[in-house]
Image (cartoon, rainbow, N blue to C red):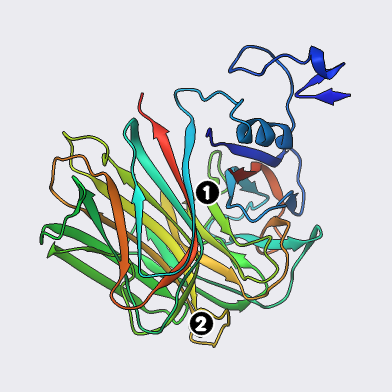
Amino acid sequence: MAAKLIQVATETVTSAVSSVILTGIDSDDVYMLAITNMDSSNTTAGSYHYPYIRFTESGTPNTTTNYHATGKLLYSGGTFLNIVNTSNDDIQLNLVHVGTGTNQTVQGIYYIYNAYNSSEFTFCTIEGVGISSSTADKLYGGQGGAVLIQTTQVDGVELSWSSSQTITSGTFTLYKVI
Amino acid sequence: MSKYGYIGKESDIPQQAFKSNAGVLSVNEISNLANESKWTVANSDLVLLSTMDFENVSTLSVGLPTGYDTHILMFNEFSPIADNTQLQARFIINGSINTSSKYSYHTLRNDDSNNTYSLVSTTSSMVLFNATSSQIKYSGGWNMMIHGAANDTVIPKCSWTGVSVDANGDTLSFDGDGMFSDGGTGTTPTRTRQEAIHFFQNSNNISGHLKVFGVYKP
């Protein structure tokens, strides 16, 4: 049987928004979220902020402090770092974005498991890459995983930046793996 | 009515074939066509090779058919049945499980208590997937890519990523001991077609769901 990545939702941001919500998870299949060229309103070189993800239920982001994440931050300018988030109200996507220049954006692929099953926790694996530039371009890669410790039916994701930054550009697509 | 991107009587709707028309298909229509084997695969497509639902089994053998450079295994709701177990795998060659001590792997685990665990071997009789076995893990899911298994001239290689939480046996819970992310790579230096991969625990059984995809050989 032919298999597909079926696009269930996509949004391309061309003017600033506070967040992007993609819904359409409607089965127990594995889903894949692709983030391309996610940029922010940050204009302060050297200021750290991060892309965040929350899961949605009936289209509304779950803001409870039931998110846990862990992984490795790989850094071209030095040694790797451990990333640990416990009982947060969102998932830090393990990627640092600092830069204010062109192409200093975040990319990533995230596989989402057990989201639609209301008897299971919702999990995701994290793989991403971003560039910061306080003095020179530096590359950050993230690899890890996260979980929402709640047995609720998840139907999508919300993406945003930390520090009240807005999303100024980017393409966000949610696929069903069938 | 509208079906497969066309408006009109059902008898007028053409058969869908790859690039043969420009109908605009909905997600469900593509899914329906795929399920009816009417959605033709392009040379670069993923192909769903098999699905497996397994409950309380001691081993799991997954076929790796020829014609694909890479096989992708997607597990979800994967869970060990008992405490303190560790997932392992070997390849199957000519109908026999390869138990030679020629497997190499490096597996890495991070937890949300800021610990890192690593296991490495170049003389193992199997590939190990999780770098600790001291706690029960309820895995949300993991992906594994196997490269070159269906080719008898290259060395097979695999890589994986996964995410899991502590649990009470196979009963879903979160007991405060944390969650884990795993990644790793493995290989065995055998330039032989690997017919299947054989999963097993160091003790006790596993449950879960699996989809196996093939990436078409160009």
Q: Amino acid at mark 1?
A: Ile
Which residue is rendered at x = 49% and y = 64% of the image? B208
Q: Residue A59, position in %: x, y?
A: 80, 57
**Is B101 on the left or on the right of B209, as rendered?**
left
Which residue is rendered at x = 45% and y = 82% of the image? B113
User: Disc number at residue B167?
Assistant: 2
Q: Which residue is mark 1?
A: A109
* Location of residue B203 by image quarter: bottom left
Q: Quadrant of the N terminus of chain B?
A: top right
Across the whole image, how many numbered discs are drawn on residues? 2
Which residue is rendered at x = 52% and y = 25% of the image? B41
Q: As displayed, is residue A123 above or below residue B70?
A: below
Q: Secondary structure at mark 1?
A: strand
Q: Residue B166, position in %: x, y?
A: 48, 81
Closer-to-camera residue (B196/B135): B196
Q: Residue A150, position in %: x, y?
A: 67, 75
Q: Amino acid at mark 2?
A: Ala
Residue A95 seen anywhere in this rendered image of the structure: no
Q: Residue B63, position in %: x, y?
A: 34, 46
Q: Secondary structure at mark 2?
A: loop
Q: Quadrant of the C terminus of chain B?
A: top left
* Location of residue A72 by image quarter: bottom left
**Is B26 on the left or on the right of B34, as rendered?**
right
| Chain at numbered mark 2 | B
